[in-house]
Structures are given as C-alpha cells and as structure tokens.
Amino acid sequence: MTLADAADDYGASWGENDMIVYSRLDGRGLMEIPAAGGTPRPLTTIDTSELAHRFPVHLPGDRGVLFSSGAVLDLGSTRIMVKPRDGEPKLLIEDGTNARYAPTGHLLYGRRGALLAVPFGLERLEVVGDPAPLLEDVQQSLTRGATQFSISEDGTLAYVPGICAELDRTLTWVDRNGREEILPVPPRPYVHSRDCHRAARRSPWASVTTIATSGFTTSRAELSAG
C-alpha cells in the first residue's frame, strides 16, 4: 500500500501511536502520516541554515522524535534535535548524526566514522552527561551522514565496520530514447545532480560542480533558499 510520496527519502520511523514520520529532501522538513493511510502533515519546518531534517526515530512512549538537522554535504554542520510530542524542536547535540535511543538510557550517534554514547533523560528530553566513544571505524556516508548501526529493544547493537567515506560516482546523461553518455568529469561522491536553475532554487548552500561543454569547475556556492 502506498502511503505518500517520499522522494529523496532520508529515513522513516513507525511510532507506538501508529504514526509514521518520514523525511524528504524538498524543503518541507519531517512529515507525518497515519499508518492506516491519510493526508501527510508537516511535523517540522526547516530554516535557511538547513537543507534537510532526516533520520527520524520515535522515542519510547511516543515522547518525541529524534532527527538530524543540517546541511547534507557538511557533516560538521549536522546537529541532533528532538521534536517533543508537544512543543517545538530543540537542540540536543552539536556535531552528530543518526541518533538512536538505547534501553540503557543513552543516545547512540555517529560522528565522522565513530559511534558515541551520551546519557539521555527520557522524561525531560535532554542530554544529562558527557559523550563517550563506543566504537571506531563504523561505516558512515560523508555526503548523507547515514551511520550504519542499529540497536534493539534488548540492547543488542549491530553495525557495519568501515570508514567515513563515500563511493565515487560517474555522471551520465540519458536521453528520452535511453541512450547514455558518460560525462567527461572525474569520479567523485556526487549527489543530487540538478540543472543549474533548479539547483539554485532548491539548495541553501552546497559544494557545486558545474559542467559545460568546455569542461567542469568545482566551487562553494552561497545560495539563497527560495
């Protein structure tokens, strides 16, 4: 059963209240929809310093939803937030991504290829101690921030060993007849390719590679969202 359009999906979570929270990279923040179907409604909104809200995770008892906030192409800007059941989102952790709640009363989260744990007060939805490293060399995407781990309700931790990196990709034009043409640019961890006009409208900022018939250039572009 199709519930909603989730283009550029950045995670989803099914809560105890039978509400599904999901993310999309289209400037609308987190969305929420009943598991039985219905009309999606916004749960959060993004501001001009953000590109996406992603990796939502329901907290026990439907007390709120954890999520990551920031610019997809800059892990150093990513923050961990919580949206309480009633109230506005608030900051929990600077420089972190992909938080999950552990039954030990900790938040586990990724930071540049490492997995950290920090004590978390579930009743007041706040960090109550200092973070400590749990694991090094946990696979993490440089461009998306996705950290490859999960923890079960009984406290069992599963993760994918690896490095904080991204697979290099090539860019290819495909015409309406299915003919492919590989573009003459070096392999890199490209994401979210767009024509220039659309990219300027959608991206608050990005590291932009522009391609012309004469070659390519890479630059940091400060672009206004709107």
Image (tube, rainbow, N blue to C red):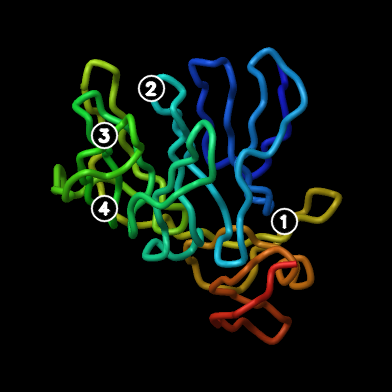
Query: Residue at point 58% right, 59% down?
Result: 51
Query: Is 215 situated above or below 224?
Result: below
Which residue position is annotated with label 1?
A: 180
Residue type at numbered disc 4: Gly
Residue type at numbered disc 2: Pro
Q: Is residue 141 left or right of residue 187?
A: left
Which residue position is annotated with label 4?
A: 113
Near mark 3 (Cα within 10 A), the count class, few <14, some 14-19 or many ≥20, is: some
* Numbered disc total: 4
- The disc, 3 or 1, on the residue closer to the chain's N-terminal end is 3
Which numbered marker is on residue 215? none
Which residue position is annotated with label 2?
A: 60
- Choose mark 4 or mark 2, whichever is in front: 2
Which numbered marker is on residue 159? 3
- CB of mark 4 within 8 Å of CB of mark 3? no
Q: Is residue 103 left or right of residue 181?
A: left
Query: Residue at point 65% right, 76% down?
Result: 223
